[in-house]
Image: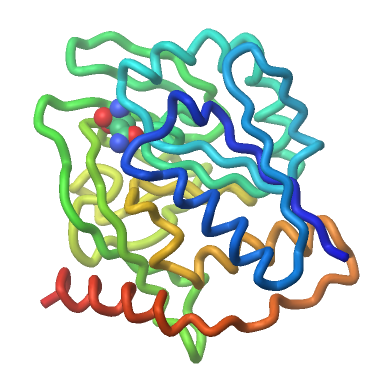
Amino acid sequence: MYELNICHLYPDLLNLYGDRGNIIALKKRAQWRGINVNISNVTIGDRFDASEHDIIYLGGGQDFEQKILQEDLLNEKASEIRNGIENDRVFLCICGGYQLLGKYYKTCDGKEIEFLGALDLWTIAHEDRMIGNIVFECDFLKSETCDGKIVGFENHSGRTYLGPGVKPLGKVLKGNGNNGEDKSEGAVYRNVFCSYSHGSLLPKNPALTDYLLNLALKQKYKDFTFLAPLDDHLEELAHNSMIKRILK
Ligand code: GLN
């Protein structure tokens, strides 16, 4: 019997736009395959040991909440998050949860919030926000059955720039993505997958959900081979109707 331990970091603070839906999607798509799933909610003041979790998730948050958790992030959880990243734990980090893995976040009033520096990226906030539906393409998801397109919703004032140490998650087809300038969306480093896409991201993008589950299971069980296919016609209907609407 396979089992996955999923850690939801700062669920009480990084909880914008239904991002909890990503935890639900990971849990249900694993359980529908008979995989046992344990969810741990870890927030300020809680102990965190990355080696106890197979998938670690951070959702989106406003500047205000990002400031609140900064002290705990940098002083209590930073080394364990870095350990998890460098030991190839699977991370999914959305928007604010994405930004805080970078070097810093410069707010609109010029304050520089020091962040983890675990990924080679940085974010600069602007008065005008990037809000709207987004479609981007992930080459690593392309197969006979998947065109690699991902659909989501973005709402961020931060513009994120990637250094040479990370790759984009995908290429923007519609919307802004990281910064509205270089057509990059999100970031990938080792098994860390970051995106600006809320929605929440995973329910309408089953291929990405399964990719993360596969990665975590292969990391944990040397005998694990593949996830049994599911009847995804509802997910595909939602996915394809949104893509059609946004790309028309
Ligand atoms: N506070 C960050 C920004 O505005 C992240 C927002 C979010 O998580 N949606 O860019």
Question: From what the image shows, is residue 130 above or below residue 66?
Answer: below
Instruction: Give the image location of residue 146, x and y in percent.
Output: 45, 82
Residue that appears at 70% across and 76% down? 227
> Taking 116 as reference, is 154 left or right?
left
If the image is split into quadrants, where does the N terminus sit? Answer: bottom right
Dividing the image into 4 quarters, which one contains the C terminus?
bottom left
* Residue at the image point whose x is 30% and y is 45% from the top: 178
Residue at left offset 67%, top offset 29% = 82
**Count of numbered marks:** 0
- Seen from the viewer's position, the closer of residues 190 and 207 is 207
Name the side, left or right, on which 183 lies relative to 9.
Answer: left
Q: Is residue 155 left or right of residue 24?
A: left
Q: Percent from the top left, x then y, of residue 139?
A: 45, 71
Dividing the image into four equal quarters, which quarter contains ligand 1?
Answer: top left
13 is higher (above) or lower (below) than 192 = above
Residue 99, image quadrant: top left
The single residue placed furthest to the bottom in the displayed view is 144
The one of 131 and 204 positioned closer to us in this rendering: 204
Residue 64 vertical position relative to residue 193 in the rendered view, above or below: above
Report the residue at 63% width, 41% height from top: 56
